[in-house]
């Protein structure tokens, strides 16, 4: 079947201005505003009208909140009630000036994990504890409560601005229905879409110059695969409408990698052994605990080397993927546990502990590695990630991660978000300034680029403490793992123990597609930067990796090739992440 629209052509909703591409509208703000405002007169569907009716009814309640779907268990419903009776958790239900209700909805009631209990005095019976997530559509913020349903009390609550939790399946289904019923999608595909043509995944997304991006609306993208191309139908779940459709090239590929028949048993084992409890690891002078989180990958905590505390914890918070450098669309997603989690790409195998060897095949440390995979990989719009912690016998360590492709397009930029919290409360942060180390006095961010200066040893930053501290060496293609340079954003924030700011599991904290420093961690250092002198410090490290499918230069890519009559998967990984080297006195 032929495709009638070219790659990257965007079709906005039935607008008087016709089928103008987004590129033709750049610089024509008045035309663009008129197109976007025309959404108010778009057709609606019966299932949308039912949804709007429920919203209006909820806004009349003393606590104007759309409750979690009917599938909630009795314990989940109890946890929801306890959270909604907590005045701090519900402080954003009304506009403080007009007293009019904001639209709030409970998106998730998840079984709490050990990683959710960070900073909460224990012990607690995790079987009775839940994480309740509520989204405020008007303010675009997320409220989180950790609830002990057995004790009937809220143990902790925190708030994340400009942040959207994963929507419940009922909203994902609604987005799919809107996409399939929209004539623009049918016209773009050339036939009436059905659920059979939908890919299994959905993506939280954005689209620049629409309300998804300008007004920070909640948007997801049901996707349809057709030959070598994928159609993204970008649906605004705040306004319950299609924002636009977008074709991207996915490339040729063979079938998906075979799925093991014992997959369910493997998932059960991963969840029971690594998601519900921490595992102790003592090796080569290193002492730590690790566990799989619901949305922040494999977290290590209480990391000690030769008796000296090194890290409070470290984890992989998000993967942001941008499929267009100019139009700004893509997805933000999480990696984590296979069950009862918010992860879009789940743990595929149990964590592995491997020997780390040098070029002479001598063991110099060990690697703690975790794989995450979509079931359809390496077909289009499926993903394969690895997370690695490298620990050396000489005290060095590296926090790293990589994409093994394939994603939805051959024009992707991957941005993994690492959060690295150092032990102790007497740390100071320095950057190299051509001839000497210069201290950062307050919270700050910086971009690694072609003009970045490095110390003679190749270091960019230093985390100094009374015990010595660590130098930070960013990726420049020197780690022999195929990486071609990180071009990283680094943010330093202060952890004061009073606010969560990422200690417990985070929902996806940043937009998919910003090309500047607005990647998520900036919300913890703005609008007023705090002092970071002699403090407990958190380093956020976000690499930027551009994929490539050209023969001979493949990167962040995977494809199936016929060899000797059978399909073999070829992988071209892109790894990134900083090395930390002990400061010696």
Image: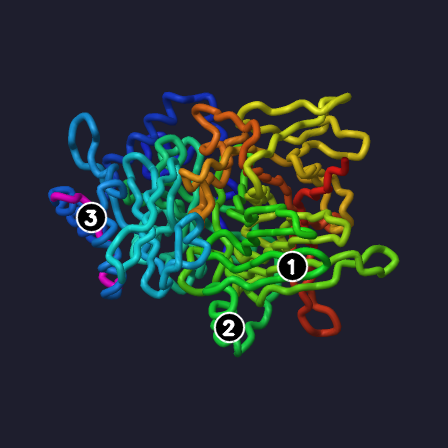
* Point 51% across, 41% down: residue: 8
Give the side of residue 426 with respect to residue 53, left or right: right
Element type at mark 3: loop
Is disc 2 surrounded by few (<14), some (14 to 19) or many (20+) residues within 10 Å? some
**Which residue does the image show at 16% across and 33% down from the upper left?**
100
- In this rendered view, identify the residue nearer to me: 60 or 504: 504
Give percent across and percent down for residue 63: 16, 44
Q: Residue at x 30, y 34 (%)?
A: 139
In magenta stretch: residue 233: no
The quadrant of the rendering that contains the C terminus is top right
Q: Which mark is residue 87?
A: none
The label shown at residue 269 is: 2
Tell me, yes or no, whether the two marked residues, 2 and 3, touch with CB atoms within 8 Å.
Answer: no
Numbered disc 1: secondary structure? strand
Q: Is residue 403 above or below residue 578?
A: below
Q: Is residue 224 visible?
A: no
The circle on residue 85 is 3
Mark nearer the N terminus (3 vs 1): 3
Nearest to the eye among marks 2 and 3: give it: 3
Secondary structure predominantly adopted by residues drawn in magenta: loop
Residue range (magenta): 62-72
* Residue 368 numbered tag: 1
Q: Earlier in the sequence, mark 2 or mark 1?
A: 2
Q: Between residue 488 and residue 445, name the one nearer to us.
A: 445
């Amino acid at each position: 079947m032929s495709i009638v629209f070219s790659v990257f052509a965007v079709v906005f909703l039935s607008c008087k201005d016709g089928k103008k591409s987004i590129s033709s509208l750049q610089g024509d703000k008045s035309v663009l505003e008129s197109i976007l405002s025309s959404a108010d007169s778009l057709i609606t569907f019966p299932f949308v009208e039912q949804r709007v009716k429920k919203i209006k009814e909820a806004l009349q309640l003393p606590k104007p909140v759309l409750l979690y779907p009917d599938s909630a268990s009795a314990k989940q419903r109890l946890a929801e009630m306890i959270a909604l009776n907590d005045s701090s958790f519900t402080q954003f239900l009304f506009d403080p000036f007009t007293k009019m209700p904001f639209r709030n909805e409970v998106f998730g009631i998840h079984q709490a994990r050990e990683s959710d209990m960070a900073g909460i005095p224990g012990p607690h019976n995790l079987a009775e504890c839940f994480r309740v997530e509520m989204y405020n559509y008007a303010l675009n913020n997320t409220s989180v409560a950790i609830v002990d349903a057995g004790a009937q009390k809220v143990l902790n609550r925190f708030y994340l601005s400009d942040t959207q939790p994963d929507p419940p399946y009922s909203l994902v289904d609604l987005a799919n229905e809107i996409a399939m019923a929209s004539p623009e999608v049918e016209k773009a595909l050339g036939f009436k879409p059905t659920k059979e043509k939908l890919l299994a995944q959905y993506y939280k997304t954005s689209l620049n110059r629409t309300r998804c991006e300008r007004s920070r609306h909640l948007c997801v993208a049901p996707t349809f695969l057709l030959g070598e191309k994928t159609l993204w139908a970008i649906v605004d779940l705040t306004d319950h409408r299609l924002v636009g459709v977008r074709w991207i090239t996915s490339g040729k590929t063979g079938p998906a990698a075979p799925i093991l028949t014992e997959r369910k048993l493997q998932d059960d084992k991963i969840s029971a052994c690594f998601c519900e409890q921490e595992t102790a690891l003592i090796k080569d002078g290193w002492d730590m605990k690790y566990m799989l989180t619901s949305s922040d990958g494999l977290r290590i905590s209480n990391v000690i080397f030769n008796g000296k505390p090194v890290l409070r914890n470290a984890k992989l918070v998000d993967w942001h993927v941008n499929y267009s450098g100019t139009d700004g669309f893509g997805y933000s997603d999480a990696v984590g546990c296979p069950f009862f989690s918010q992860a879009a790409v789940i743990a595929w195998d149990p964590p592995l502990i491997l020997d780390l060897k040098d070029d002479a095949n001598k063991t110099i440390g060990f690697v703690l590695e975790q794989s995450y995979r979509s079931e359809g990989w390496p077909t289009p719009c499926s993903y394969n990630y690895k997370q690695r912690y490298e620990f050396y016998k000489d005290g060095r360590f590296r926090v790293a991660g990589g994409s093994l492709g394939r994603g939805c397009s051959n024009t992707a930029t991957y941005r993994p978000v690492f959060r690295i919290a150092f032990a102790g409360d007497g740390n100071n942060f320095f950057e190299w300034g051509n001839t000497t180390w210069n201290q950062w006095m307050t919270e700050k961010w910086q971009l690694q680029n072609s003009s970045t200066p490095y110390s003679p040893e190749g270091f960019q930053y230093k985390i100094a403490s009374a015990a010595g501290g660590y130098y930070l060496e960013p990726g420049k293609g020197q780690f022999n793992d195929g990486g071609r340079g990180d071009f990283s954003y680094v943010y330093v924030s202060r952890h004061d123990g009073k606010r969560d700011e990422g200690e417990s599991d985070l929902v996806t904290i940043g937009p998919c597609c910003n090309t500047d420093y607005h990647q998520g961690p900036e919300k913890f250092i703005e609008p007023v930067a705090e002092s970071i002198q002699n403090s407990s410090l958190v380093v956020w490290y976000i690499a930027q990796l551009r994929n490539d499918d050209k023969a001979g230069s493949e990167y962040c890519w995977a494809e199936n090739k016929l060899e000797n009559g059978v399909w073999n998967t070829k992988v071209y990984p892109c790894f990134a992440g900083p090395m930390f080297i002990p400061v010696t006195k």
